[in-house]
Image (cartoon, rainbow, N blue to C red):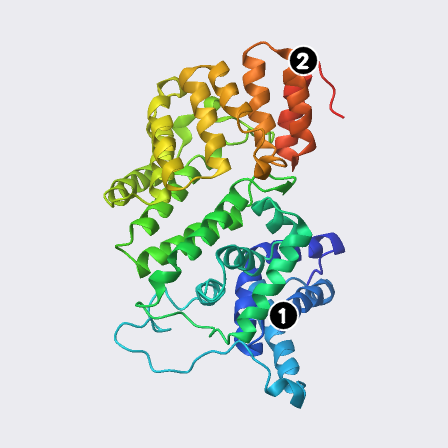
Amino acid sequence: MTVPDTSAVAAAVADAHRREWALVLAATVRVTRDLDAAEECAQDAFAAALIDWQVHGVPARPGAWLTTTAKRRALNVVRHRGVEHRYLPLLVEEETTPGPGDLVDDEPGLSDDRLRLIVTCCHPALDRSAQVALTLRLMCGLSTADVARAFLVGEATMAARITRAKKKIAVARIPYRVPSAAELPERVDAVLSVVHLLFTTGHTTPAGTELVRRDLVLRAVELCRMLRRLLPRDPAVAGLLALLLLTDARRDTRTAPDGRLVLLEEQDRSRWDRQAIAEGAALVREALSSRPPPRYALQAAIAAVHAESPTWNDTDWHEIVALYGVLTQLWPSPVVALNRAVAIGFARGAAAGLAELDALAGERQLAGYGYLPAARADFLRRLGRVAEARAAYTQALSLTENTVERDFLTGRLGELGGTPV
């Protein structure tokens, strides 16, 4: 047997962490009945892999090796818990006989510890921001800094939020199980928020050398399809699945062969996934039949306008502006307002779009959001206001940590005769 070198092992462990973290952690929670202990055991398993795989080679099924190792460590933790732990509140799995409306573990496609972990974290006892943040942290293995970036808040604030959420789960004795079909709808909004943020984090990674974390995108789509099977008549679920499919349909055209970012207006639409677009469009029509339409259905409708436009010039920007208008009324958000401003710029001209963007300058949540100065820079460039465009590109660069996006912004800045700081 050929033993891989240290760099190969490190790469294999990193790849396993991206692909298998959620499964390893979720299975380990069933043993420890404690989130912090399960996280520690899962982390120990990945650390052990760095040593063991160097000696014995990378196993054929890394996820199974990691899960077994984590669960063994978890059993040791459980055995060595002192008497003082026995009466502390623990995350418990209810051993009840399922009723006619309950989900059962042997139901095809539903026996997934990840879903069990998501709905536990999205229990109504937790506030919405805590539900989403905790699930992103546990499901994806994202660092607290990455979760904070997704929420546009500071890392310390997010760390405190996650800690409070874990404590509340323990104190409230929230069961680690998939709720009954009757209980699940009240958690749907939070679960969908989790899946959506999981997708957006993978679709454009906040930091790193790659534009896309394909594993997170695939996991989000997979979980959304699972929710679709659970709640086949829920318009919000249909809307989110449509949004994910229509957005991901462009995946192969978002970067050039050399890794360069390719804007939507420059993408080769003949390479878009037409099967995904057709499925997404059908789901949009279904989801929009609900009144009022769910926000994900409106976002998916916007994505459908892009996906079904044969060329960039054929895009119906006025329809997109109108859809953003409805979305803003139903779900007001600074980011939605930003996207609407950009759409206005393409529908009515760069000057109109710039005016809308400048009106958002005082939004506190957008203060550290790199897409605002990047959008301003683009409209300023189109208007020939070169010095202002350079300043805006420089500001966008200071707020952008993804290498692919930074390279794009640096290139734009260079075209205008500017030098990145």
Is disc 2 placed on a helix, strand or loop? helix
Residue 40 lies, in percent from the top left, at 66, 69
> Do we see residue 268 in this rendering?
yes
> In the rendered image, which quarter is residue 4 located in?
bottom right
Q: Is residue 12 visible?
A: no
Mark closest to the chain's N terminus, 1 or 2: 1
Give the residue pinned by disc 2.
Answer: 387
The quarter holding residue 70 reads: bottom right
Residue nearest the viewer, comparing 296 with 306: 296
Residue type, numbered disc 2 = Ala
- Identified at 52% across, 64% down, the residue is 23
Q: Nearer the viewer, residue 92 or 186?
A: 186
x and y, in percent, of residue 200 in the image: 50, 44
Q: Three-letter amino acid code at disc 1?
A: Asp
Q: In percent of the image, x 31 and y 67: which residue is there? A: 181
Decide: few, some or many residues near mark 1? Use Cα within 10 Å; few <14, some 14-19, many ≥20: some
Instruction: Find disc 1 in the rendering and name its residue.
Output: 36
Query: Which residue lies at the image location 50% right of the left edge and 36% below the top edge?
Result: 335
The image shows residue 157 at horizontal and vertical percentages of: 65, 53
- Residue 272: image tag: none
